[in-house]
């Protein structure tokens, strides 16, 4: 069982897939306390994973960007995020004062009905995992379903924090109850879906993930929008539209943010003695002044100030 406080960052691989394993084969569950203010750049970067995730907001409020939708969640509210769905979290307006403390419960779907295709997984797991309307589900206490699911999330958090006797069994029990409630709340919709049909294919997400993989493989090079669009075989305008719909930013904005993200990571290395110009060039900028401008925009300080701050913490 993994219960961790104040993650500094989300480690992702190609096309933004999270690399961390959540739990283990016997108990594929991770439960994490997240203090958004302590996160790198005060946000949870865009990522996705093969596991399902539930969010419960403990204090304050945050902006949860789930694929093409954006939700503001406050204390006592929660969210279901389906497997394979791009998502990120950021501060709300005035977030520096309010902050956002939330708990993330990440688990592999096999926990519910085991591995492989069984009748139970076909009838009760796949309808949610493959539903085009279930990329995410906000839990706002608007219905008895929401109220009950939020209570189940609080119980999961409690038994995992306290390492209560049989906490693994309690967790599985509460998650199955939540799953039943999600099925019951959309029973007519799910009963109308052919059991064998997997239909949750979001082409915007597919293209966005491939475009991001291209950007992260070539960010040190002078790549253009033409290059990014060609990598996913669409026009420049369609490339911009699909990434904007999925990630609320243009391909160019993501490229710039990724370059600054990498540069900030290099500055955390005490052995990094590059000048600002050398660092800017290393991450793909041909102008150190523009690099400095974007660094201040995203991290609210200069690269020199950022390096000094990180070294003082080590």
Image: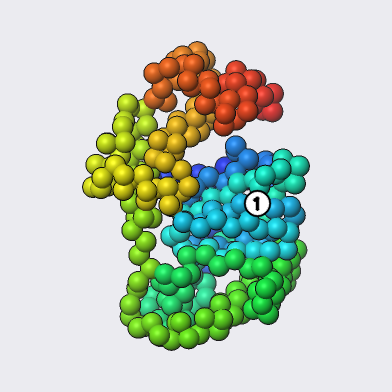
Residue drawn at point x = 48 percent, y = 69 percent: 134
Q: Is residue 180 left or right of residue 12?
A: right
Q: Secondary structure at mark 1?
A: strand
Give the residue at mark 1: 62
Other residues around mark 1 within 10 Å, as few (<14) / some (14–19) / many (≥20)? many
Residue drawn at point x = 38 percent, y = 82 percent: 193
As drawn, 169 above or below 66? below
> Which image quarter is the C terminus in?
top right
Residue drawn at point x = 37 percent, y = 78 percent: 117
- Residue 120 is at least partly visible in this image: no
Residue drawn at point x = 55 percent, y = 56 percent: 70
**Residue 292's spot in the image, x, y percent?**
53, 20
> How many numbered marks have been drawn onto this rendered protein structure?
1
**Residue 159's spot in the image, x, y percent?**
72, 68
Among the 4 quarters of the image, the one containing residue 203: bottom left
> Which image quarter is the N terminus in?
bottom right
- Residue 140 is at least partly visible in this image: yes
Q: Is residue 132 left or right of residue 93?
A: left
Q: Identify the coloring.
A: rainbow
Nearest to the observer: residue 66 or residue 282:
66
């Amino acid at each position: 069982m993994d219960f961790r406080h104040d993650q500094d960052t989300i480690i992702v691989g190609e096309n933004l897939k999270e690399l961390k394993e959540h739990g283990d084969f016997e108990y594929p569950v991770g439960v994490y306390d997240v203090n958004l203010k302590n996160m790198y750049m005060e946000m949870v970067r865009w990522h996705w994973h093969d596991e399902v995730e539930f969010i419960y907001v403990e204090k304050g409020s945050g902006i949860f960007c789930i694929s093409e939708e954006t939700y503001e969640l406050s204390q006592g509210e929660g969210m279901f995020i389906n497997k394979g769905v791009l998502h990120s979290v950021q501060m709300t307006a005035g977030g520096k004062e309010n902050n956002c403390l939330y708990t993330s419960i990440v688990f592999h779907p096999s926990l519910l009905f085991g591995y492989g295709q069984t009748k139970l997984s076909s009838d009760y797991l796949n309808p949610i995992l493959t539903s085009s309307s279930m990329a995410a589900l906000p839990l706002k206490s608007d219905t008895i379903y929401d109220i009950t699911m939020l209570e189940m999330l609080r119980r999961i958090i409690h038994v995992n924090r306290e390492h209560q006797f049989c906490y693994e069994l309690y967790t599985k029990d509460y998650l199955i109850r939540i799953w039943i409630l999600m099925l019951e709340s959309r029973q007519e919709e799910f009963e109308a879906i052919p059991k064998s049909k997997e239909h949750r294919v979001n082409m915007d997400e597919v293209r966005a993930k491939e475009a991001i993989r291209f950007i992260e493989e070539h960010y040190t090079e002078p790549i253009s929008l033409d290059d990014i669009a060609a990598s996913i075989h669409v026009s420049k305008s369609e490339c911009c539209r699909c990434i904007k719909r999925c990630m609320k930013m243009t391909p160019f904005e993501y490229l710039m943010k990724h370059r600054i993200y990498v540069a900030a990571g290099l500055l955390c290395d005490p052995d990094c003695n590059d000048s600002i110009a050398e660092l800017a060039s290393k991450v793909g900028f041909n102008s150190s002044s523009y690099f400095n401008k974007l660094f201040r925009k995203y991290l609210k300080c200069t690269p020199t100030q950022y390096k000094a701050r990180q070294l003082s913490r080590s």
